[in-house]
Image: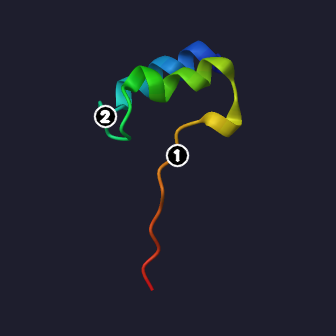
Amino acid sequence: MKTAQDRYFECLEVCIENEQGKSCRQVCAPILNDDPSDHPTVPIIKKH
């Protein structure tokens, strides 16, 4: 099982700076706290 630190560094590897209006460290930091309610999300727009 991956540690929170492993997931944090993987997040930094794939993160695009300011993609969500935050720095990659801000986007990935909640992983270290292991708070599922604060993990980065990508909205999926459904087309009708």
Residues packed near mark 2 inside 10 Å, few (<14), some (14 to 19) or many (20 plus): few
Q: Residue at x 70, y 29 (%)?
A: 35
Q: Quick one: 9 or 46, which is closer to the camera?
A: 46
Q: Quadrant of residue 6?
A: top right
Residue with the mark numbered 2: 18
Residue with the mark numbered 1: 41
Q: Nearer the viewer, mark 2 or mark 1?
A: 2
Q: In which quarter of the image is residue 36?
A: top right
Find residue 33 and report its horizontal and vertical position in percent. 67, 19
Q: In which quarter of the image is the N terminus?
A: top right
Disc 1 residue type?
A: Thr
From what the image shows, is residue 4 above or below residue 48?
A: above
Specify the label residue 19 is tagged with: none
From what the image shows, is residue 18 above or below residue 23?
A: below
Q: Residue at x 60, y 24 (%)?
A: 31
* SS at badge 2: loop
Disc 2 residue type?
A: Asn
Find residue 45 and report its horizontal and vertical position in percent. 44, 68
From what the image shows, is residue 3 above or below residue 37?
A: above
Relative side of 5 to 1, left or right: left
Q: Which residue is drawn at 32% across and 40% down?
A: 19
Residues packed near mark 1 inside 10 Å, few (<14), some (14 to 19) or many (20 plus): few
* SS at badge 1: loop
Dot 2 or dot 1: first in sequence order is 2
Relative side of 17 to 24, left or right: left
Relative side of 11 to 15, left or right: right
Q: Residue at x 38, y 32 (%)?
A: 22
Q: Quick one: 30 or 10, which is closer to the camera?
A: 30
Find residue 5 and report its horizontal and vertical position in percent. 57, 13
